[in-house]
Image (cartoon, grey):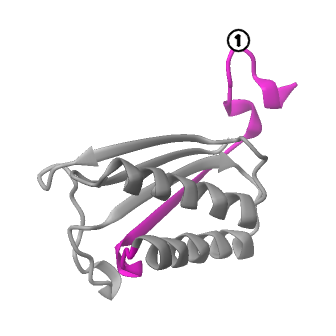
Amino acid sequence: MPLVRISLKSGKSSDFKKELSQLVYEAMRETINIPESDKFQIISEHDKNNLIFSPDYLGINRTEDIIMIQIVMNEGRTLDLKKQLYKKIADDLNNRLHIRKEDVFINLMEVPKENWSFGNGLAQYAE
């Protein structure tokens, strides 16, 4: 917990994706207090026909460099912690990878703790 899915345009270097992954992980560690080594991420690259988004929804001007981050995590974090997470991710991606903040799209999905199995067919958090 959490499981992070990151979708972005094809063509970014391995170093870019590695740094992106690390920045999201560090932001979660700092803001929502995930445990050390709790890093489960899937990075998917898409061509322009398979990364579909509104370029101006809510008055935010997005470009083809959009990065969509979906985080599935245990329920229970406060609204303030979630806002801190969004800001930390957007700020860090902007500062370190020069990604426009307008191009950082984040979605959180909260689930009960018993909805996880980390291996061995067990519900480790339900124990």
**In the displayed structure, does residue 126 sit left or right of residue 53?**
right
Residue 30, x across and y down, in percent = 74, 65
**In the displayed structure, does residue 15 sit left or right of residue 112?**
left
Name the residue at the top extreme: 120
Disc 1 marks a residue whose amino acid type is Asn
When the figure is inspected, residue 112 is found, relative to residue 114, above or below; the finding is below
Tally of numbered discs: 1
- Residue 95 in magenta? no
Q: Nearer the viewer, residue 65 or 22?
A: 22
Residue 125, x across and y down, in percent = 81, 31
**Residue sitting at x 74%, y 16%:** 122
Quadrant housing residue 27: bottom right
**Residue sitting at x 41%, y 67%:** 105
**Residue sitting at x 31%, y 87%:** 59
Q: Which residues are magenta?
A: 98-127
When the figure is inspected, residue 118 is found, relative to residue 93, above or below; the finding is above
Residue 35, x across and y down, in percent = 79, 47
Quadrant that contains the N terminus: top right
Quadrant that contains the C terminus: top right
Residue topped by disc 1: 120
Secondary structure type for disc 1? loop
Name the residue at the right extreme: 127
When the figure is inspected, residue 28 is found, relative to residue 83, above or below; the finding is above
Assess disc 1: are there few (<14), some (14-19) or many (≥20) residues with their C-alpha within 10 Å of its C-alpha.
few
Quadrant housing residue 99: bottom left
When the figure is inspected, residue 107 is found, relative to residue 35, above or below; the finding is below
- Residue 114 in magenta? yes
**Residue sitting at x 40%, y 52%:** 15
